[in-house]
Image (tube, grey):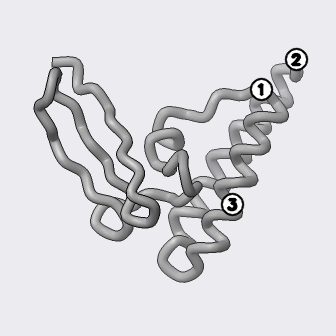
């Protein structure tokens, strides 16, 4: 198990890499994808959970940073229960987030 200080540093690195990936996605998508792979590896090595904002902002299938209107679209759906549906336009993966209503 990683020491508390190591996890704190890892979380800072993860948040920094995610922010840089969001800024880079428009100019160099492959570099942004590499940043996402690095932040996932840091989280795995230090056994740190990814923050909710980061988890919901990354496609699980293709490691692309999801920017609404640029490479993903978001819909509010009502099937069994109401949920938010985020579709990655790079790979077609659909991520569903329950709204809790």
- Report whether 21 appears left or right of 96: right
Name the residue rendered at 49%, 50% in the picture.
59
- The residue where tag 2 is placed is 1
Along the polypeptide, which appears first: circle 1 or circle 3? 3
Tell me if label 2 and label 1 are in contact, CB under 8 Å.
yes
- The residue where tag 1 is placed is 47
Residue 98 at x, y = what percent? 28, 26
The alpha-carbon separation of the residues under discs 2 and 1 comes to: 7 Å
Q: Secondary structure at mark 2?
A: loop
Q: Nearer the viewer, residue 83 or 28?
A: 83
Of all residues shown, which one is farthest toward the bottom?
27
Q: Residues within 10 Å of mark 1 (few under 14, many from 20)?
A: few
The alpha-carbon separation of the residues under discs 1 and 3 comes to: 18 Å
Along the polypeptide, which appears first: circle 3 or circle 2? 2
Q: Nearer the viewer, residue 83 or 16?
A: 83
Residue 6 at x, y = what percent? 85, 30
Q: Secondary structure at mark 3?
A: helix
- Report whether 57 appears left or right of 38: left
Tell me if label 3 and label 2 are in contact, CB under 8 Å.
no
Q: Check the image and report above or below for 22 versus 37.
A: below
Residue 51 at x, y = what percent? 55, 34
Name the residue rendered at 39%, 57% in the picture.
92
Name the residue rendered at 15%, 38% in the picture.
77
């Amino acid at each position: 198990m990683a020491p508390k200080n190591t996890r704190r540093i890892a979380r800072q690195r993860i948040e920094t890499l995610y922010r840089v990936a969001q800024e880079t996605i428009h100019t160099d998508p492959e570099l942004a994808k590499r940043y996402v792979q690095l932040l996932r590896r840091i989280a795995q090595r230090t056994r740190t959970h990814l923050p909710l904002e980061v988890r919901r902002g990354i496609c699980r299938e293709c490691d692309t940073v999801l920017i609404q209107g640029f490479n993903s679209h978001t819909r509010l759906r009502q099937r069994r229960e109401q949920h938010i549906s985020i579709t990655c336009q790079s790979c077609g993966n659909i991520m569903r987030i329950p709204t809790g209503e």
